[in-house]
Structures are given as structure tokens and as C-alpha cells.
Image (cartoon, rainbow, N blue to C red):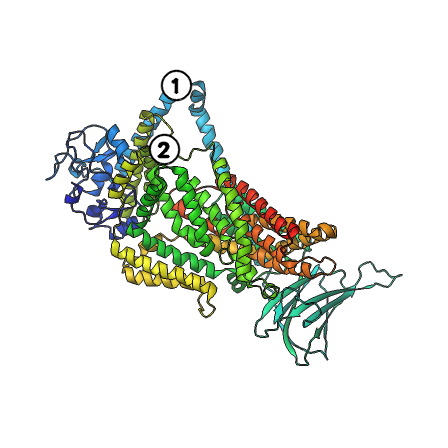
Amino acid sequence: MREDWQWSMHLEGRDGRRYPGAPAVELLQTSVPTGLAELAAGKRRLPRGAGGADPSHSCPSGAAGQSSWAPAGQEFASFLTKGRSHSSLPQMSSSRSKDSCFTENTPLLRNSLQEKGSRCIPVYHPDFITAEESWEDSSADWERRYLLSREVSGLSASASSEKGDLLDSPHIRLRLSKLRRCVQWLKVTGLFAFVVLCSILFSLYPDQGKLWQLLALSPLENYSVNLSSHVDSTLLQVDLAGALVASGPSRPGREEHIVVELTQADALGSRWRRPQQVTHNWTVYLNPRRSEHSVMSRTFEVLTRETVSISIRASLQQTQAVPLLMAHQYLRGSVEAQVTIATAILAGVYALIIFEIVHRTLAAMLGSLAALAALAVIGDRPSLTHVVEWIDFETLALLFGMMILVAIFSETGFFDYCAVKAYRLSRGRVWAMIIMLCLIAAVLSAFLDNVTTMLLFTPVTIRLCEVLNLDPRQVLIAEVIFTNIGGAATAIGDPPNVIIVSNQELRKMGLDFAGFTAHMFIGICLVLLVCFPLLRLLYWNRKLYNKEPSEIVELKHEIHVWRLTAQRISPASREETAVRRLLLGKVLALEHLLARRLHTFHRQISQEDKNWETNIQELQKKHRISDGILLAKCLTVLGFAIFMFFLNSFVPDIHLDLGWIAILGAIWLLILADIHDFEIILHRVEWATLLFFAALFVLMEALAHLHLIEYVGEQTALLIKMVPEEQRLTAAIVLVVWVSALASSLIDNIPFTATMIPVLLNLSHDPEVGLPALPLMYALAFGACLGGNGTLIGASANVVCAGIAEQHGYGFSFMEFFRLGFPMMVVSCTVGMCYLLVAHVVVGWN
């Protein structure tokens, strides 16, 4: 039996358990200790083709029930080179088995495969590999054999139809190959030229910096200054820093404020008619809490090259002076031109992601570089310090800490155990299981952060889908959509809700945690009641089961994981290069095996498992908790971290943000788990996801500096003012919901929400408009939260889920998410809009 063999190290198998399957130790312990560590850390779950085969399968020699594992005395080279020859070679006997064999079948549900039987490939002893055979020869031999088999199978398939003959002709294949190389060359050349152009533009314009002037304003004194205009300047940006608030007062006329008056000559003046003076007023309200400081900016259009005069006066209830910092800066390019550039950059980023020209992380980096170059050209180039300040490190710390916790958690076998339990609760019914998972995710995300919920749920969902031979992509997309919906139900479930509830002006208007949660909870319950049937309708013609037998699906996944493992080995030495070539040879052998299986098995769509009770018993024996002590430690630390997440929202005396709580929890668990090989844990961190978020934060802030978000808010306010007064509230709710939803699908909803709050507050305080502020805020919350389901990068949870799925070998594209997410977003926003119209227009719940 397998437990009778002794191995010198363990790697995780295809099913997520730790198996004694890495015979590479026998080869690498004396020559490449570092290469082995990289092999072990390169992938979280190595396929069972190397260490996870079921020892219960029989071998051709009739050794049924005996071990199918190569003994410890065999070399790693012999284990991986079992596919070198297709002829029968003598087998080396062990003390336990006369025939050492490697089973081809690697299913998760063993009962179906035991009926079909197992085919075994002999494991060759290293004595049959002569010393003259080099690593290069063995790798080349594998490649020649595999390519030859591919050509033979291609010729046999092409003989069946004229279309196959045409496509398999050498002339057509040569043209297609040249076309692919041409497209690849054009892509690389175009992107490189674009990057070089942006780099040159960014380097040509220096960082001007801002010269802040300290002003002491009082009711008795005014401040004025005359500025000389620049030849190529079209805009003048004035910045104020101090105890300021972005929105207007709840009771106009009784608040302390500052008026900035900018005067310049009209451009229509001539020598016969004296130019008229044009004056622009900017009113900024002071914060009663003088200790709180903020920076506010306003851009004015420069009409002529004449001198511009700036006058600042204060309206205070006391004679005590108020300190204020002021800076000004001339910019090149009008607001319309900047908005056009920002829109083009955003469209380019989405084109790169939608058509998968480059990875989404690189697409966000390219967009950030283009936006920074545009800011440099218009004269608003930020310094490196400012760019770093644009990154939301609290979100990155939360992601990093929770990724460490989940990586250690996965070592306990808890995710496999949860998958089996969910399978038992669903009683083998797939749709019952999917609805249950989505509902639990929605409930948890109402109280936890959406990102945290998906970090915990994604590994469980993937393991469960592998057990049931489901396509994890479809289930994960549905799960993350309901996570975003559930996060909108409370004031702490989604960042836009937190921003709205934390606004001091809204608190003065009576918006509190309980009222906001009660209002949103009712609407989200209605959304869920509609979205669950819609999910079933959208999946009506889609097959959630894999269209191929489970052994073929798993074999494809093994090939993918082996290839990733080989690519992650750095060829720093001759031995590491040899191991990498051996792994690539393993990939070629498995691909040849896959080709034979596809030729042997007929494709069929699996039906729902009728023998679920029998499968449950087998799965419970197989998927157990592997380390109970470590599981207890993980549950303790994770439970404490979640408890602190709750306290952080309700207890103001806890001065720990979500990022700090996650980082401290990760450090605690690293100490309790006694992790020595820290590199293995770091390999499981989604660095590409973290880098994507950092680049996305820079991109969104740069687009905000290009006035894109401000322009969207101002145009929305203008459209609302154009509607007749008796229909204005209805039009305002409809516009705010859909503008927020569409904008949140394309850009980050956090800066959009922060920008729209003062715009809507000023709109509600305008006596000519006369709109209540709270219905507009509820509309903003519905649109910003539910709009994240529109696209893959519309919400942080979407990106995190896609990154984890990609690491497990089940990545989904932008369009795969869009086909399901966008219809769900449209229907959910429609339901939320109808709820707001009934509550505030019909019932009058203002």
C-alpha cells in the first residue's frame, strides 16, 4: 500500500491534499537543493500525475490493490521519463509490489472510474537510461515523439473531411503561422512605441511643484494678488488647504465661509470698445472642527493674456483669524480636451483588457503611464511622492494580510472538508448548492468586506466544483455577483456606503447607520428575490457540468499546472535547467496521453450525480482535516480578525483600520503556525492582483486630475436642472442610479462616490432646484454598489476572485464575466430604481 513507502518530502497533490509524491528529492538532494525549493513553492497544488494517483488502481500485470508509486530508491528522472518509450520494458520490483506502475486515471469521484478500469504506464528504472543520454537528448526525444504523434493524429483526422484537409495542409499552416507572428510583432512594436512616447513626454516636462502661501484671514482684512498670465495657458488652478468642507451647509447663510473672487478681462474687447471685466466667484465653507484639514481645488478658464486678479475674503462669526494655505498653477489644455484625453485612455485600457491583448495588470500600468504623461503635458505633472500617496495602502494591506491567512488555512484541508459538507447539504443537487453558496456569500458580504468574503469563498468553491466535475468559472462569477449585491445591504458592506455614512453633512441631516442600513436592506432583499430566478434563466442554456469526462478535465488541468510549475523554475544552474526540461517532458507525455484519451472516449455531457450518497462516503474518507491543531490556530486567528472587523465599524475607540487588522492577524498566524519556509507562503500571494490594484488607484486618481469624474458629476447636475420641478425628483433618482452604475462599471466606485457626494449636496442646497439630499444619496449607493457587477474591473471583489481562480488554473476572461455580470447589473439596478421611486416619489419616504 502507499503508506508503506517512505518519501523524503511531500508536495500537495491534484486534490489539494499533501501527498508523498515528489521523487525529485532523490535526484535533487545532492545537487540542486535550491531548485527543489523553487519546484515545491512554484505552485500550490501539483497534479496527481506526480504524486496523487490512487494506489487502489490495478496494473497491467495484475497487481491489483498494490502500490502504483515508484519506490524511494528510484530517481526522479525515471519517474518523469515513464513516457519516454511506448514499448514494454522490464519493471524493477520492490519489496511490496512486483510491478511499479503509474495510473493514468486521476479522478475525484473514484466509483465511476472503477467501473471503467484503469490503464497504467510503467515507471522505468534509471538503470535503463544510459549515462551517455544527456538531458537535452531526453527532452528532444520527448518533443520529437510528441510532435510525431501530433502529426499522425492530425493526418488521420484530416482525412475525414475536406475542411480538415485544407486546414492541415502545410501551405495553410505556414500562412497562419506567419500571420500569427506578424500580429504578435505588430502588437509588441505598437505597445513599445506607445510606452517610449509616453516616457519621452513624461520626461520632457518637469515637476513644477506648488508654492503654498500662508494666509491669515479675518473679517476685517481681505487678501488680493495679481497674477501674470502665461502665453500657452488656458486654465488657472487655485488650491486651498485648511479647515474646509467640500459640500455646502445644511442651513445656508449661517455657516462660516470664504469667497474666492477671480477677475480678468473679457477676450471680446477691442481697441474701440474697452474690455469688460469678468468675475468668477468660488465659495468654500469652513469646517467647524478647525483641527481637520483638507485640500480643495477649482479650475478657472483663462480668457486673455492679461493680468488675473485673485481676491479672498472671509465671512466669520468671530474676529479671530483663520489660517489658510493657497497655491495657484497654470495649466495647458481646456477642460474638454482633458476629459477627451481621459476618456481615450480609459477606452484604451478597456480595449486591452477586453480583447486580452495584454494581462489586465499590465493594461492598468500602461493606462497609468499614459495618464501621467497627459498630466505632464498639461503642466500638472505629479511628483513620485504624490503618485505613491494616490495608492490606497489600506486596501492593499487588507488584501495581503488575508491572502497570507488563506494560504496557511489551505494547509489544513479545511477547504476540501467544507466542499464535501456543502455537497452533502445540497444532496447532490447542483442548483441547490449554487444558490446556497451565493446566498451565504451575500449574507457574509453584508457584514464583512467583499474582498475578504471572496478570499475565503473562492478556494472552497473551486474544490467543490472539482469534486462535482463542474466548471468553476460559472459558479465563481455567480458567487462574486451576489457578493457585490449583498455588500450594498448595510453601511459597512461596501466602501461607497462607508463613504456616504461617514459624511458629516449627511449626519447632520439625519443619516445614521441604522436608518441607512434599514433603507438599503429592504431594497437589496427585493433585488435578491429577482436576481436568483434571473441567474437560473441566464444559465438555462448553459451546461454547468464539464462537457468531457472528469478524467479528461482533470488531465487537462494537470497539464496546465505542470506547465506553470516548469515555467516558475528559474534556470539558474544546469541542474535546475535539467529539472525544468524534465517537467516539460512530463507535459509532453501527458499531452500525448490526453490526445489518446480524446480519441478513445466519446464526449458526453455529464448528468447530475444520482449516487450522491455513495460519493459522499467516498469523499468523506478522502477529504478529511489533515492538521487539526493548525486548523484550530487558523480558526482562532481568523475569528478574532473578523470580530475586530465588526468592532472597527461600531466602536470608535479601536484605532485599527481593516488593513492593520489583517496584517496583525497574518503575523499572529505565522508565529502560531511556526512557518519556516516563508517563500512557499509568499508564492501563494496574488502579487499580480496587488500590483493591479496599485496601478488602478494611480489610474483613477490621474483621471480625476484630468477632470473626468468631475465632468460626469457636473453634467449629471445640469441634466437634473433641465427637468421640470414636478418631475425633478423622479428624474434625479433615475439619472443618479444609472450614471453611478455605468460609471462604477468603468471606473473605481470609491473616487466616483467621493466626487459625487459634494455635487449632489450642492444640488440639494440650491434653492432653484429644491431636492432632498437623502434620496439622492440612496440612489448613489445603489448605483455605485450594484454597478460593480457590470464589468470584471468594476469592483475589487471581481478582480480578487479572478486572480485566485487564475492561480488555480480556472481564470475567466473579461467577456466571460461581462456576459453574466452586465445583465445582472441592469436588472438589479432597475429593481433598486423602482424601489427608490416607490419609496420616495409615491410614498414620500424622504
Question: In which quarter of the view is residue 236 placed?
Answer: bottom right
Label 2 CA crowd tier, 10 Å (few <14, some 14–19, many 20+):
few
Say what secondary structure mark 2 lies in.
loop
- The amino acid at mark 1 is Ala
Q: Find disc 2 in the rendering and name its residue.
A: 608
Question: Reading the chain from its start, which is encountered first: label 1 or label 2?
Answer: 1
Q: Name the outermost residue toward the bottom.
A: 319
Can residue 137 be seen from the camera position used here?
Answer: no
Instruction: Work out whether residue 158 or residue 716 is closer to the camera in this orientation and state it.
Output: 716
Relative to residue 604, is residue 623 depicted above or below?
A: below
Say what secondary structure mark 1 lies in.
loop
Counting every numbered tag in the picture gives: 2
Question: In which quarter of the view is residue 228 placed?
Answer: bottom right
- Tell me: 603 left or right of 249: left
Q: Are marks 1 and 2 in contact (CB under 8 Å)?
A: no
Quadrant the N terminus occupies: top left
Using the image, tell me which numbered label, if any, was put on residue 677: none
- Tell me: 665 left or right of 82: right
Q: Find disc 1 in the rendering and name its residue.
A: 159
Quadrant the C terminus occupies: bottom right
Residue drawn at (86%, 64%) of the image: 274
Label 1 CA crowd tier, 10 Å (few <14, some 14–19, many 20+):
few
- The amino acid at mark 2 is Glu
